[in-house]
Amino acid sequence: MNKTFLMTLLSLSLGFATVGCDVEKTRDGEMPDVDVDGGQLPGYDVDAPEVDVTTEESKIKVPDVDVDMKEKTITTPDVDVDLPADE
C-alpha cells in the first residue's frame, strides 16, 4: 500500500514538474543551403534463387459418406528452389 502511494505521489510530482515548464522560442530556425550536382545510383549484381512451382498427383485417403475410407488422387503443389552458387 505504501509503495503504491509513493509511486503515485512520484508520478504526480513528475507530471506537475513537466507541465509547469515555460518554453519560449528565442530564435527562428532555417534550412541550410545545399548545392547538388549530378550523381549516380550504385549498381548491384544480384543472383536470386530460381523457384520452380509445378504440380504432382498424390494419393490420399479421404472420408466417404459411408464410414469406409477410399483412396483418391488429387493435385498438390511441388516447389523446388535452386539457390545461386556462393562465389
Image: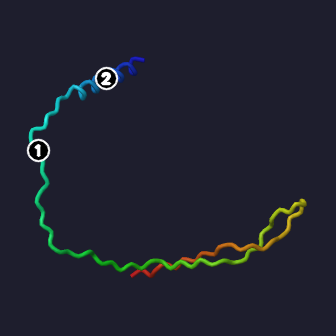
Residue 69, picture quadrant: bottom right
In the rendered view of the protein, which quadrant contains the C terminus?
bottom left
Residue behind mark 1: 28
Name the residue located 9 percent from the left edge and 42 percent from the top edge: 27
Q: Residue furthest left?
A: 27
Pick whichever, 79 or 19, lies toward us: 19
The crowd level at tag 1 (other Cα within 10 Å; few <14, some 14-19, many 20+) is: few
**In the depicted structure, whether residue 82 falls above or below residue 3:** below
Name the residue located 35 percent from the left edge and 20 percent from the top edge: 6
In percent of width and height, residue 16 lies at 26, 24
The crowd level at tag 2 (other Cα within 10 Å; few <14, some 14-19, many 20+) is: few
Gap in Å between the C-alphas at discs 1 and 2? Answer: 34 Å
Residue behind mark 2: 12
Q: Which mark is residue 59?
A: none
In percent of width and height, residue 18 lies at 24, 29
Q: Amino acid at mark 2?
A: Leu
**In the depicted structure, whether residue 35 falls above or below residue 50:** above
Q: Is residue 83 left or right of residue 25?
A: right
In the rendered view of the protein, which quadrant contains the N terminus?
top left
Q: Amino acid at mark 1?
A: Asp
Residue 63, picture quadrant: bottom right
Residue 62, picture quadrant: bottom right
Element under disc 2? helix
Which tag is nearer the camera, tag 1 or tag 2? Answer: 1
**In the depicted structure, whether residue 18 falls above or below residue 44:** above
In percent of width and height, residue 40 lies at 23, 76
Q: Is residue 25 left or right of residue 64?
A: left
Pick whichever, 19 or 13, lies toward us: 19
